[in-house]
Amino acid sequence: MKPQYSGREVLITGGLGFLGSSLAIRLSALGANVTIVDSLVRGCGGNPYNVSSLKGRVRVFRCDIGGASQSLYRSVRRAEVIFNLAGEISHSHSVRFPRRDALLNATAQLHFLEHCSRMVPGIRVVYSGTRQVYGVPRYLPVDENHPVSPIDFNGIHKYVAAMYHWHYARMKRLDSVVLNLTNVYGPRMALAVPCQGFLANFIRKAVTRQRLEVFGDGQQLRDPVFVDDAVDAFLAAGSVETLASRAYNVGGPEPLEVGRIAQIASHLGGLPPPLLRPFPDDSKKIDIGSYCTDTSLIRRELEWAPRVSFEDGLSRTLEYYRTELRHYLPVRDAEPHCQLAPSLERLPRAAAAR
Amino acid sequence: MKPQYSGREVLITGGLGFLGSSLAIRLSALGANVTIVDSLVRGCGGNPYNVSSLKGRVRVFRCDIGGASQSLYRSVRRAEVIFNLAGEISHSHSVRFPRRDALLNATAQLHFLEHCSRMVPGIRVVYSGTRQVYGVPRYLPVDENHPVSPIDFNGIHKYVAAMYHWHYARMKRLDSVVLNLTNVYGPRMALAVPCQGFLANFIRKAVTRQRLEVFGDGQQLRDPVFVDDAVDAFLAAGSVETLASRAYNVGGPEPLEVGRIAQIASHLGGLPPPLLRPFPDDSKKIDIGSYCTDTSLIRRELEWAPRVSFEDGLSRTLEYYRTELRHYLPVRDAEPHCQLAPSLERLPRAAAAR
């Protein structure tokens, strides 16, 4: 990847988050000039500590992508490739605060893409989509032709953002592509933010030595993907000469039962075996049953494959938090208070008119 | 239909528009107590003259469904069934003003449905969707299983609104259903508003005695549905005891080539045959080729079928405008200026926080 990114101007939105910062660290090592924009909206997982190792080597602007700040405009204008990871990923939050989710995941993306298409027309934009757009799988493994049927607001709004990306690509105004990610895990996960999914929950408990709990019978399948593998997928999508498709499903190396995932985490964390618990109502409503990814398309077209086994990836994750935990805990934000940037709270008349 | 609607409290959003007002007139004749809310946003086709024949027999409130007005709340609270037709239908407008389209068709609907689900939980809501969500048809006729792939912002945002309706139905918070309409035509079409589609354009020209122009070779298929038939579909969806499906495609009695449609309109308008013109770039970009509807599902489950032939429907349409034209012309709004209600222009802090 070195030659493709060395000396290139790369913009990462949501770059202080788990995946965004991991991408920033890798890109910086590859010699890219990295600019990060992140609004640090409470509940979305941004954490400046994530890029503390890059001090002086990346530009970081605190601004929201739906806004109209000079920092944002300057960052966009200089970019040669954009990794667009800003947004809210919590399904639970979206159920309780649907309008907040709409603003953060849909409206802000429309504003951002419109800006990009005017300032840097035709630029490659790689968007972090989600498997949640497929809803309850009708077959496994799930490929890109699976019908779309999101079962919560987060899935709806992430799909809206994906449709925006495709629309700009179809109009040849941006060269955008969507990666539909399954559960990504690894160092820098936002353990301090609640409702970030079961893996963050398991890892937090394994690190803080609390016994793990599994909802239901533990037989649901998931195929977690280690963050380094996910970063590789973004780098591939950002650097391939010509995009053959506009959506790729990104999944882990093997499907595992959630009960097995909990066992591995408990074992690596030196804890007793996990407990089985009935599904809480809130979680049941937005549960999708088993999921695993058909990665044939991205393997074929982007020559990407997940390489890190779950045991290996989780070991490296727990290792990270053994020394860095204090920067990720305690859980401070019990609520995703709507600390939206002004431009998201109220659209200025001029913006609304265009 | 008389017994199902007699004495019932019915709310129609967008009730001053073409289809909404036609529904109001029919429901009023059936003995329903009709309340209309309409924000009369410029460019969306609302026209108070449409319901002038109902004076004193319907309540009309000028308020936007994304807002927080007392009129809206009172209207929702008393409703027993809701026909949700508010929105922008112009694809051309949406291309030029994507954010406006997002506010009117997506954000406002989320606000509205959230209000409805709290104030009148479980209420039947019938939403006016569009065939545009399917994009360029992959096969004809298009059924409800056709993949979704909107090619313009209007199609994207109408699909978002549809997903919202399904979400509330899945959560059992509303009993909502979406009718995906193909080209609807008839008396009260918004001839004064530009960019309302080719049929409004043909009818305006036929009525004002200008020669019709057809873009392309005129061989594209469409299956226009007469407004009385469309109204019947809404009445059926609003009154059936239990909804078997959550989306129905609504189409006309037969597919016709656009060239043939133009010939019929020219003939009925006493004009020379239409001229063929190359597609303008703007229109070409959002053109979907041929379209016609598979109406099997709605025929089977709602016992609805289109009954009015295009020739008959168009005669009745031209007949209407022969006496009423002055209330629909001249074309006053060359631009869909963003005359949004305040709540849509800027979300109050309280609304954004929920």
Image: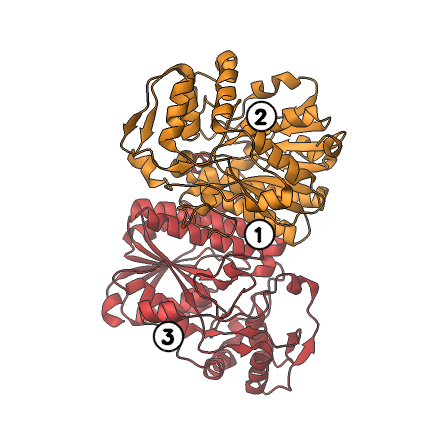
Chain colours: A orange, B red
Label 1 secondary element:
loop
Label 2 secondary element:
loop
Q: Residue at x 43, y 46 (%)?
A: A140
> Which residue is labeled 1 in the image?
B338
Q: Pick the residue in front: A296 or B226.
A: A296
Residue B125 image point, x, y percent? 34, 56
Q: Is residue A326 above or below residue B354?
A: above
Q: Residue at x 40, y 37 (%)?
A: A221
> Which residue is labeled 2 in the image?
A16
> Which residue is labeled 3 in the image?
B305
Q: Is residue A6 left or right of residue A315?
A: right
Amino acid type at image mark 3: Ala
Residue A268 image point, x, y percent? 43, 19
Q: Chain of mark 2?
A: A
Q: CA distance from mark 2 to mark 3?
A: 55 Å
Is the residue at mark 2 from the same chain as the one at mark 1?
no
Q: Which quadrant holds residue B51?
A: bottom left
Q: Pick the residue in front: B192 or B312.
A: B312
Q: Nearer the viewer, mark 1 or mark 3?
A: 3
Q: Residues within 10 Å of mark 2 (few under 14, many from 20)?
A: many
Q: CA distance from mark 1 to mark 3?
A: 38 Å
Q: Nearer the viewer, mark 2 or mark 1?
A: 2
Is the residue at mark 1 from the same chain as the one at mark 3?
yes
Amino acid type at image mark 2: Leu
Amino acid type at image mark 1: Cys
Residue B59 image point, x, y percent? 35, 60
Q: Is residue B82 left or right of residue B134?
A: left
